[in-house]
Amino acid sequence: RKLPAMTLQNILVCVNVALFAYQMITVVVSFNKNISRGWLSTTNNYNRKKSLIPNVRFSPLTNDFMFMGVLATRQPHRYITSGFLHGGILHLLLNMRALVQTPTWLEAGLGKPLYITVYLASTIVANICH
């Protein structure tokens, strides 16, 4: 029996969920490594950097790729990479529901290159408007 072809929708959902899982795992690892240094320690031993927001624990992935307007002028990759990061499970679930509910004919009609361009362009525009 032949398996159905993977759509970009499915691939984007898988990438977003995998990155969210990685965010959650690395924030726990980072937090556990810092617990001996004190609850309010702002150093992140996992990647030897300070947290962007003091006293808030982010995974190294989040610190390096989340959108912050001040940093985006020097690090323009944040306009795109932040579109794959999520602030919590509800944020992830709502975004993935919206992505899955996007009609499959849209991807077929636009074609894969234009579909991914629209996806990434919406991430950039959302960050500019944020």
Image: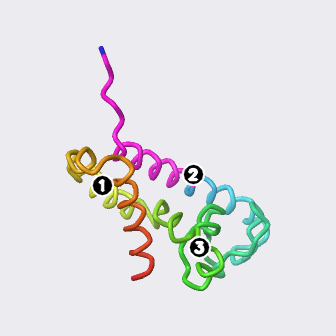
Three-letter code, disc 2? Tyr
Three-letter code, disc 3? Pro
Q: Are marks 3 and 1 in contact (CB under 8 Å)?
A: no
- How would you rate the neighbour count of disc 1 (Cα within 10 Å): few for under 14, some for 14-19, many for 20 or more? some
What's the residue at 59%, 52% (across, down)? 25
Answer left or right for 72 relative to 89.
right
Counting from the top left corner in percent of width and height, residue 94 is at 31, 60
What's the residue at 35%, 61% (across, down)? 118
SS for dot 2: helix
Residue situated in front as seen by the camera: 13 or 8: 8
* Secondary structure predominantly adopted by residues drawn in magenta: helix
SS for dot 3: loop
Q: Quadrant of residue 69 in the image? A: bottom right
Q: Is residue 86 magenta?
A: no
Judge depth for marks 2 and 1 and give the one in front: 1
Judge depth for marks 3 and 1 and give the one in front: 3
User: Which stretch appears magenta?
Assistant: 2-22
Q: Quadrant of residue 47 in the image? A: bottom right
Q: Is residue 5 magenta?
A: yes
Three-letter code, disc 1? Leu
C-alpha separation, residue under disc 2 versus residue under disc 3: 22 Å
- How would you rate the neighbour count of disc 2 (Cα within 10 Å): few for under 14, some for 14-19, many for 20 or more? some
Label 3: which residue?
76
Judge depth for marks 2 and 3 and give the one in front: 3
Toward the bottom, the furthest residue is 70
Q: What mark, if any, has residue 22 been given in the picture?
A: 2
Q: What mark, if any, has residue 99 been given in the picture?
A: 1
In the picture, which quadrant includes the C terminus?
bottom left
Residue situated in front as seen by the camera: 57 or 74: 74
